Image: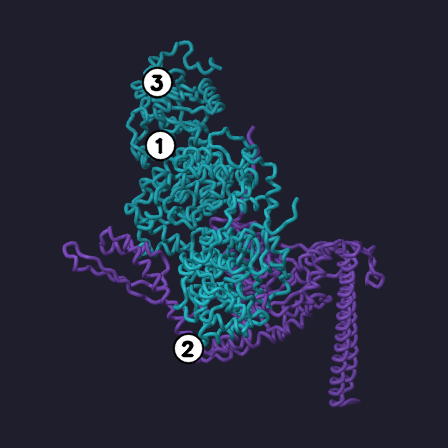
Chain colours: A cyan, B purple
Amino acid sequence: MRDENEDDYKFAACTFFAKNHPGETCGSNGLPLTPSSVTILGRAQRLLHLEHLNLCTYLDVIRGKHERIIVVAEVIGKSLNEVKSKFSHEEIANIGLQIANALKFLHEQDITHRTLSADNILLDSNGRVKLFNYGMYYMTKSGKEVSFPLGLPRYLSPETILGGGGPSADVWTFGIILLELCVGKLWQNLKPGPILRRILTLVHAGNPAERIAREHDYHETYKQVPDSLKNIIEKCLKIYPGERATFAELVTELSQMDNKKLVELKKPRGLMGCKLQLLYHLWQLAGGDIQAELKKNCLIKSSPPILSMPIAILLDGCTIGGKTGALFDRRIAKYSLNLLKLRLIHISPHDFYPLMHERKKEYDAVTLPKIIRERDTEYQFYRLLWFQRLLHGYPYTAQYIRAEAEIDIPPLVRGDVWAALLGVVGDIEEQYERIDKETPTPTDRQIDVDIPRCHQYCWLLCGEAGHRTLKRLLKAWLLTNPQYVYWQGLDSLTAPFLYLNFCNEARAFACLQAFVPKFLHKFFLKDNSAVIKEYLAKFWQMTAFHEPVLATHLHEINFVPELFAIPWFLTMFSHVFPLHKIVHLWDALLVEGPSLPLFMGVGILRQLRDTLLSSGFNECILLFSDLPEIDIGECVKESIEMCRSSPRSISYRRFTNEPEIKDPMDKVEIPMDVLFTEICPRISLSDFFSLVCQEKCCVIDIRSNLLYEKSCIEGSINVPYSGVHLGQHELRALGLQPQRALTEAAKLKKTVVVASAEDETAQLFSDYLVKCGVCRVCILHGGVRALHTHVPSLFTTPPPAARGSRATERT
Amino acid sequence: MTAESVQNTTKTFKFSFPTCTNEDVLFKLEVPVEIPHNGSTRELVQRVINMFHIPVYLEDELNEKLAEFVTEETKNFHNDRDEKLLNQLKNSELNVEGIVKNWEKMFKDNVMEFAEQKGTSDEEVFAAAYHKLVHSPALDTILQVENSYAKTVMNTLNNRDEDIKMLTQRQTEEMEEKVRLLNTFTTEEEINELAAQHFEQQSLAAGRWGSQLDALCQAQRAHHRAWLMRTLDQYQACAELDTPSNSPLATFSPEHVPAPLAPRQRLEESFTIHLGSQLKQTHNVRIVAMDMLDLCTVEHVDNPTEASRRLQTSLSLYSSELSACVLVCESAPSRPAPPTAALAAAAAASTEHHFAHVDAQLREIAERVKEPAEARNAQRLKDQLAQGGKDTKNRWKHSLQPGDVFVTRHSNLADVHVVFHLFADTAPLRTGDITSRHPAILGLRNILKAACCNDITSISIPLLLRNDLCEETTAAWCLRRAELVLKCVKGFVLEAAGWGGAEPRTLHFCVPPAVAPDLFQALANLLPTIFRISNPVKVKPPPS
């Protein structure tokens, strides 16, 4: 392995403490004040998405223990401070131009740098200049969220020292830096006080730049500086900010002087050609530890807490003795990617450029649980490259993305993939811009009450930035969907989209806008009782279909879904689970489609099965008042399995935005009041037909044996309804043959279809089967008569001898 | 520094466009805009267009004009403010010296580069050494040494008690003799004189023993330190450890191990709970009937259970997993009374090798608390008078008020490192009903917050906020009080999740040891109704 040199360092971290709120911490709304570190974290998110040639990309902002903030950003080469050689005037002009370009960009984004200094301007061996950690002033809310002063004394402009200072203070600092580059270090051995005093006396000088140079005995050197450069320095070092040049002007002037062209480097290939965000993510997966390096460099010092215990705490929260504020250390810790390079050393170069139509490699990691796959460096590496490629081609690659998302979604690109799965396309920014999110509306009050209670354990969502954005999203959605009203829970539903698209409000909105009609059509109507009732009834039927014993128990103790499942479905589980579980749940949801949630509900019940079976009504209520831990991976797996193995028509709901079903073969719709009385779902004729063709069903004909003998469905068993004792919940009571057929059906996971002449008997008999613990029972919609009309080919006359015994013969 | 001077202003954005029939007649539009404007100007344009029904073909122009307007005005806003400041400076209207001093102080106090260079303190060096050794093979030796030191102190204490007892006995006899002979051989003056003499003797003896103890502790502490530092050097040099010849271990005989005392029977019950509505956090909650001081007192006998308790405490002393307990006390730190006095006695039972002696700690607290607390009290009194309240000057004569907390640190107690003394002397706390806004409850919140900020992960709280039971504390009262305390603590722990410090992982709720078993059961049954007992995911073997 090579020795580490300057170029190996790809990113660096610095750390500081946010301000502590003194004393009692309650805001005007009676809720605790947001900790400063959370505010900083929220503001810094925007910085993570800034990209400019002359800015070091921010990679991560971490909130540590005790209000510590760690900022991770790209680094290159050396800082101007570390470069010992002097620059020629041409080089200075070129460096100046690059800095000015960066600052022009920042000012356009309404970001003031304030902390520009020779040690955060980085220069690599090719002459590329990048500014490092330019967002301190912005993320700390103009320094309000930290207790230390920002910037270095010698770079502060006079008005900043006096307590003012806008963006043009950066121009002054830029001027000082240019001057330093031309003549040498300024005020080198002075303490902050004298430096500041000297800067303030400059206000009386006609030409501050010259005055500074004279003060330092640099006058001769300054005279030799070309006029054009001198001119620029003097334009920056004007006392009145109004008279200073702007960066736009400086860029124009400097580019006239600058004739040096940067050597265009060939983009590195392979690992180093990947985006830095991706590399940082993989580096962390490979075991990279930001905090460890900071500790090694003494940037995180751990003094034993017992030594800094306070000696008294007064009632108002005033603490006496104890911790003194930690000092702000401006040093940084640098990191190389060697760890990751070693980890991925065996990957062949052409794996970095996967071809879309190439036969894909199978990774053995696929069989592992999702949570483990998400932490597997190599697996994530392949997945991320592949997904990046697919996302690049979106929307044309939508179907590929869906197919891949079915396997899993890498957390790093989850926001993009979800948007793709929801079919978000077009100029969403402009559409979002057009919506008025500011004008007060009557629902604002309720929204304001709910937001501080919505997923507040997540640092992003609990800060000021999170609250404001969530409110804007909710208002925008309500305004665009006037047919809907604000139901509590909409906030939770929006939270995952905001969490994944924190700096892309428009996309979060577009995702929500696409999600609701697909999964929660009509749920947010002012009167949504019919929609919810139907949904719950369907959920209850699915429970009976897959978990008959459990369903029977819950029916018996009268524990109905209205008591617990409304928030599940109204928020698609986002109200009951933490975000890290919701994302896995929704990964599946977005791929599988709108019938999956019903089975997820069943999946949750299945996990609690043992507890539920041994509980009475009161215990159940208590259990669900605060849902216990659920293994989401397992729940998702089982619900997908249930969903795929269930005939589509049994989960049919009328309140969806899918096109109306016209074909009588596909119809299963029954009046709502009938639906509420039926425990078993209905299967459509076409689903039934395909089940019969695949030999995946066991048909029980409950008409009288006279009718049965006349003509019956091929392979069906006749259990005349009139002969069944509904009170006796034992299969044996049905007779030997039906019992054998039903046990066999259960073993082969066949669907049990009850065919009858009239609905009422079918209902009662299917109900009876559920009580006997028979799985997968459903009713043939329209009964034997409808089937006879539409699919007469299925009918035959049973040979009198073999009546009802076909099942046994076949085996 | 810069924050206070920023005051937003409102500027009016003017825009005009021709009417459709006449080019010269203009529609005029005026929109007040806040400067600096936070938010997108393009969104504002959309709102303006919608509200005033501006024709859409003007959209682009409006976008451009408004953005320009906001940029310009923002620039002016900053520049005008700064110009004013600079002019003031030019005209010497500003206190330049004050401003510079302020900056100087800020840089000096907060930024590493400008701060005075401070070496690592003696305390920290010792802490690091101790922590290192305690996590090395030397641990056993250290504990043995400490134990033998403690035994010496204990013996001295026993001798003192014996000596004083004998003295007292002798004096009593003497006095009785004298009194018996009163009016025959002795006069009242003589008796008085004798009493004074006795008193003098007593205080002399106490003083003698006190100074002897002090000297012993000082010597032990010095020895201990020197020995530890030496041991560390040796350990680092050869990573092997011998017992030095001059160590107190020379007198230590590990052979004699008395039979362990039968562990005291305690009523206790533990739960694992989940807190939080979506993201669930796991905590351990334990309810136990015992005296809070049991957590502090060490019995320096060679008893494996006691040794393991000490071991645990020593291992975590300089870690970030401290344990603490809350003592409800009614006396100020300057005049300790039980339970503070009992704690002080427990702490004085062996040498404090790491922190100041408990009496010195209490003295320091009394001194340093005085000023801020009195300033606070004066303020409160003023507020109360201003609100037309009665003059209740008497209430404010103590510096500490109910709800205030003082903190002592210990290295030689059995189970805890930190003791929070919750000052509360109001009658309703003892027997009456209190609400969640009672100072004692708020003090409890401060304690939990301090625990969170200072890496205390295990804390013992008196469930009834009192140390014993009496006639007035009926079962119903106990349940009511326990419910209030539990609910409040639950709220505070939930709140603590946002403070970004250490989570209080283990909560012990202590009930006075005299509690009846059925009352204890009732209290224990309260826990699962208030906290959500965790429901572990049961792994089922796959059906095969």
Q: Nearer the viewer, mark 1 or mark 2?
A: 2
The three-letter amino acid code for the residue at tag 1 is Tyr
Judging from the image, what secondary structure is the residue with disc 3 in? loop
Residue B435 visible in the snapshot: no
Mark 1, mark 3: which one is toward the viewer? Answer: 1
Mark 2 and mark 3 residues within 8 Å of each other at the beta carbon: no
Q: Residues within 10 Å of mark 3 (few under 14, many from 20)?
A: some
Residue annotated with mark 2: B88
Q: Which residue is mark 3?
A: A704
Whole-percent x and y of residue B274?
52, 50
Is label 2 or label 3 in front?
2
How far, Cα to Cα, is label 1 from label 3?
30 Å
Query: Callout 1: few (<14), some (14-19), or many (20+) C-alpha neighbours within 10 Å?
Result: some
Q: Which residue is mark 1?
A: A652
Whether tag 1 and tag 3 are in contact, CB under 8 A, the answer is no
Residues B203 and A667: in front is A667
Q: Chain of mark 1?
A: A
Task: Quarter of the image for the C terminus of chain B: give it.
Answer: top right
In space, the residues marked 1 and 2 are separated at their CA atoms by 77 Å
N-term-proximal mark, 1 vs 3: 1
Q: Please tell me which residue lies in front, B506 or A12.
A: A12
Question: Which amino acid type is marked by label 3?
Answer: Ser
Q: Is residue B491 above or below residue A241?
A: above
Label 3 is found on which chain of the structure? A
